Each structure stands twice: as structure tokens, then as C-alpha cells.
Image (cartoon, rainbow, N blue to C red):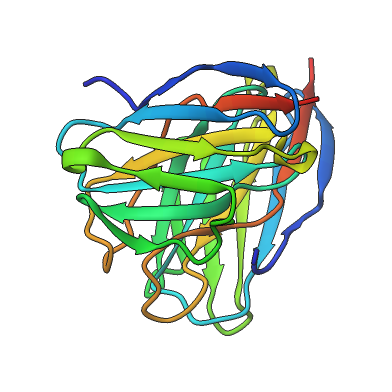
Amino acid sequence: EAGVAQSPRYKIIEKRQSVAFWCNPISGHATLYWYQQILGQGPKLLIQFQNNGVVDDSQLPKDRFSAERLKGVDSTLKIQPAKLEDSAVYLCASSSQGARDTGELFFGEGSRLTVL
Amino acid sequence: SQQGEEDPQALSIQEGENATMNCSYKTSINNLQWYRQNSGRGLVHLILIRSNEREKHSGRLRVTLDTSKKSSSLLITASRAADTASYFCARPPGAGSYQLTFGKGTKLSVIP
């Protein structure tokens, strides 16, 4: 079974530029998450999708971050404009459980963003 | 916000020794999970313990859960250099929550 795919693995941009990250979850997984992990900290949830609907985006900085999950499969996370403090690893995870029944999360390898 | 903390933040042991790390949380949970993260990689699920379970084993891993103290511990027995990683506990931040909240993790170094 293929795992969660993410790209790009690494990205370096200047502040105020934009960047987009892509995630392809495990086939059949209805729930998809984007987490932000700053160096030395645990992952922090940015947004959770159930199929193509948003379940929770309360911690997403909506003035600069946006995410979508077209057709309930792939997802894209965009940052525009980027700030220095956005430097982090962006992790995508998926789960076969419904939003009300949290189960095991399967993570991708992450996309490491450096903002200069 | 991240609820609870793993303790200790960092742990260094010799190969063959046991490693114990703890996790505390603040609200009632349905389950608690432990994940491992190797440097530069994604997180990998290790074990899930439900609120009605007190102890669970998986290979060299032993997880305990004390709901009265709102704490859990992860024991890795006979550690190996390959166990070097960060370990996170994850749990729903509140009753009926739909997501997992992670702590800051324990960074384990196993010295060959």
C-alpha cells in the first residue's frame, strides 16, 4: 500500500513570496490533516478535512494560509505572503476513520520550508 | 494549543538499557497514541491505548495509561541505536474533539 505522498520535500523562498505544498493521502482515506512542525516542537494542526469539506481550520492563519482538497482526494496548502516565522516542516497526514472517531494517523515525510 | 507535555524533553541512554518517557494531559480522553519521528522524517504510529485499558504491549514497547492521574508512559526495553528518535504522545484535546493534539516530544538518544 502506498503511503502519504508530499511534495516538494524542500523549499527555500524569500519572505513575502508564495509557496504551495501538495499532498496525496492513502487511497480511500476520508480524513486529511495538515500540521505545521516548527523545529524542536510537536506538530500543530492547521486544518482537517473530511472528504472535501473542512472540519476544523481554527488554527489556520487565514490571512496568509489557504488549503483545499479538490474531489476529496489530493490537497494543496498555500502560503501567501510568507513570513520568516513560517519556516517549518509541513506535514500531511491521513486517516481512514471519520472525524468523530479519531484513529491512527499516517504521515507523509513532510515539506521543509525555509523563509529567508 | 498543545495540551500536556512529554517528560523528559531529552533522554540519553546506553544501548541495551530501558527508556521511559511520560505524557500528561488535561482533559478526558477516548484514547491516547504514541508516535515516533526519526530525524527529518514523518511521524510513525507506534501504539494506541484506549481509556478502558491500563497497559498495552507491542514488541519491545509497553504503554501504560492512568486516567485518574491523566498520564501515560512509554517504555522501550533493551534499547537499540535505531530507537534514536523523538517520541510524541497524541490525544484529542477535549471530549468529542475530532482531532489529535501532540506534545513537544521526548528526544531519545541511544548510544551504541
Between A37 and B112, the residue placed more toward the observer is A37
Which residue is at 57% across, 24% downward? B41
Instruction: Indicate left or right for B6 with A27 as reference.
Output: right
Instruction: Indicate left or right for A89 with B35 as reference.
Output: right
Between A34 and A77, the residue placed more toward the observer is A77
Instruction: Indicate left or right for B48 with A25 as reference.
Output: right
- Place of residue A115 in the rendered image (x, y in percent of width and height, measured from the top left): 74, 28
Q: Is residue A65 visible in this depiction of the protein?
A: yes
Q: Relative to A77, is A43 above or below?
A: below
Q: In which quarter of the image is the C terminus of chain B?
A: top right
Q: Relative to B71, is B103 above or below?
A: above
Between B28 and A47, the residue placed more toward the observer is A47
Looking at the image, how many numbered discs can be counted on the residues?
0
Q: In which quarter of the image is the N terminus of chain B?
A: bottom right
Q: In which quarter of the image is residue B12?
A: top right
- Place of residue B70 in the rendered image (x, y in percent of width and height, measured from the top left): 60, 77
- Place of residue B65 in the rendered image (x, y in percent of width and height, measured from the top left): 53, 67
Q: In which quarter of the image is residue B26?
A: bottom right
Which residue is at 66% across, 28% downward? A17
Which residue is at 33% across, 42% downward? A94
Which residue is at 62% across, 58% downward? B73
Q: Relative to A42, is A74 above or below?
A: above
Q: Is residue B84 visible in this depiction of the protein?
A: no
- Place of residue B99 in the rendered image (x, y in percent of width and height, measured from the top left): 42, 62
Q: Relative to B34, is B41 above or below?
A: above
